[in-house]
Image: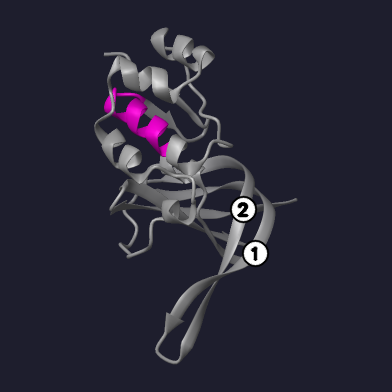
């Protein structure tokens, strides 16, 4: 694992299975795409900070006219945000990374954009997380959950007026 100062640019895209985020990270050693589930919690914008890169791999992005498209993708071990700039970034078209996961129930993910019932709460969170949510305390989602589950949890919290604090990487319920 290597730590670098750099810039993470997060873009929000609304796809077939709901809103998702992708990113690109600029470091002293190069620019890499980032397509981790944790980015779904972040708002679109530019984030300056320190990033631990746990791996870099080349992904085949497909074929074009007389060309092969390759993507250098970084996996971030941790994110430490120093500065946030939520100025809109350019709009791009990108495939939803959730489609790369074979274990995702796409209908459930799409339906979760309006998720806010007690049944949803019970199905999406464990007992400790439910207690924390019911008490209105800060919630940290488990990034080791598959992207489908993390997106459903994100949708549940967002539809119930919870906000994500990027610097603390935790959800909180704003006071009314």
Q: Is residue 105 left or right of residue 114?
A: right
- Tell me, for residue 75, which label it has, or none: 2
Tell whether position 160 is magenta.
yes
C-beta proximity under 8 Å, tags 2 and 1: yes
Residue drawn at x 49%, y 51% as measured from the top left: 101
- Tell me, for residue 10, which label it has, or none: none
* Count of all numbered marks drawn on residues in the image: 2
Nearest the camera: 127 or 14?
127
Q: Does residue 59 show up? A: yes
Q: Position of residue 91 (x, y in %)?
A: 30, 62
* Label 2 packing within 10 angstroms: few (<14), some (14-19), many (20+): some
Residue 11, quarter of picture = bottom left
Q: Is residue 93 left or right of residue 38?
A: left
Q: Position of residue 163 (x, y in %)?
A: 36, 28
Residue drawn at x 39%, y 56% as measured from the top left: 96
- Tell me, for residue 57, which label it has, or none: 1
Tell whether position 130 is magenta.
no
The range drawn in magenta is: 151-162
Q: Does residue 10 show up? A: no
């Amino acid at each position: 694992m290597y730590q670098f100062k750099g810039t993470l640019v997060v873009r929000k895209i609304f796809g077939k299975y709901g809103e998702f985020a992708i990113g690109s990270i600029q470091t002293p050693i190069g620019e890499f795409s980032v397509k981790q589930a944790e980015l779904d919690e972040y708002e679109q914008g530019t984030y300056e900070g320190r990033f631990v890169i746990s791996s870099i791999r080349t992904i085949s992005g497909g074929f074009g006219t007389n060309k092969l498209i390759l993507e250098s993708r970084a996996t971030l071990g941790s994110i430490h945000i120093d500065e946030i700039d939520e100025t809109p970034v350019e709009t791009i078209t990108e495939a939803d990374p959730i489609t790369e996961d074979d274990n995702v129930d796409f209908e459930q993910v799409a339906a979760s954009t309006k998720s806010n019932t007690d049944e949803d709460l019970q199905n999406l969170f464990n007992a400790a997380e439910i207690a924390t949510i019911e008490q209105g305390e800060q919630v940290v989602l488990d990034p080791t959950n598959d992207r489908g589950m993390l997106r459903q949890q994100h949708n549940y919290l967002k539809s119930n007026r919870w906000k994500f604090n990027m610097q603390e990487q935790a959800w909180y319920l704003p006071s009314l």
